[in-house]
Image: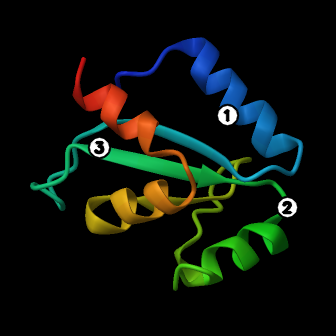
Amino acid sequence: MAFGIKRPQLNHWKQAAKSGEIAFLTHYWLDDRFPDCTTVTKVACCDVDRLIEWGSKYGLKKEWIHVRDEFPHFDLFGQWQEQILRQEGQLDQLTTLLHK
């Protein structure tokens, strides 16, 4: 279950992903399979080859891409999430969310 984001943030993420950019969206997340994780970052790009290339920089496997919707994406959580967001200059998405 996702929550903690606003429609303009979601729309910006969708537009960036549709435009072929690597787009980041961090939100609160609850999943019984990962009880220690409360947030997830969806890293999307409609150019799947570009997304695969981007993910390979961080050791993310193309098999981990979610392609069940119109926005192919990686789900980042836990240590992967913080490390990658920091390296991509996107850590503010996580820190802002956690300090609300």
Tag 3, which secondary structure?
strand
Asked if the residues shown at circle 1 and circle 2 are in contact, with their CB atoms under 8 angstroms apart, the answer is no
Mark carried by residue 13? 1
Among the 4 quarters of the image, the one containing residue 82: bottom left
Q: Amino acid at mark 1?
A: Trp
Residue depicted at x 35% and y 22%: 4
Is any part of residue 28 visible from this angle?
Answer: yes
- Residue that carries the numbered disc 2 in the rendered image: 47
Label whose residue precedes the other's in the sequence (3 or 1): 1
From the image, which quarter does the N terminus lie in? top left
Residue depicted at x 70% and y 48%: 71
- Viewer-proximal residue among 85 and 68: 85
Label whose residue precedes the other's in the sequence (1 or 2): 1
How far across and how far down the image is residue 14, in percent? 72, 34
Outermost residue toward the right in this view: 19
Question: Residues under labels 2 and 3: Cα distance?
Answer: 25 Å
In the displayed structure, 99 sits above or below 23; it is: above
Residue depicted at x 36% and y 68%: 80
- Viewer-proximal residue among 5 and 32: 5
Q: Amino acid at mark 3?
A: Thr
The residue carrying pointer 2 sits among few (fewer than 14), some (14 to 19) or many (20 or more) residues within 10 Å by Cα, namely: some
Q: Amino acid at mark 2?
A: Asp
- Viewer-proximal residue among 9 and 2: 9
Mark carried by residue 39? 3
The residue carrying pointer 3 sits among few (fewer than 14), some (14 to 19) or many (20 or more) residues within 10 Å by Cα, namely: many
Asked if the residues shown at circle 2 and circle 3 are in contact, with their CB atoms under 8 angstroms apart, the answer is no
Label whose residue precedes the other's in the sequence (2 or 3): 3
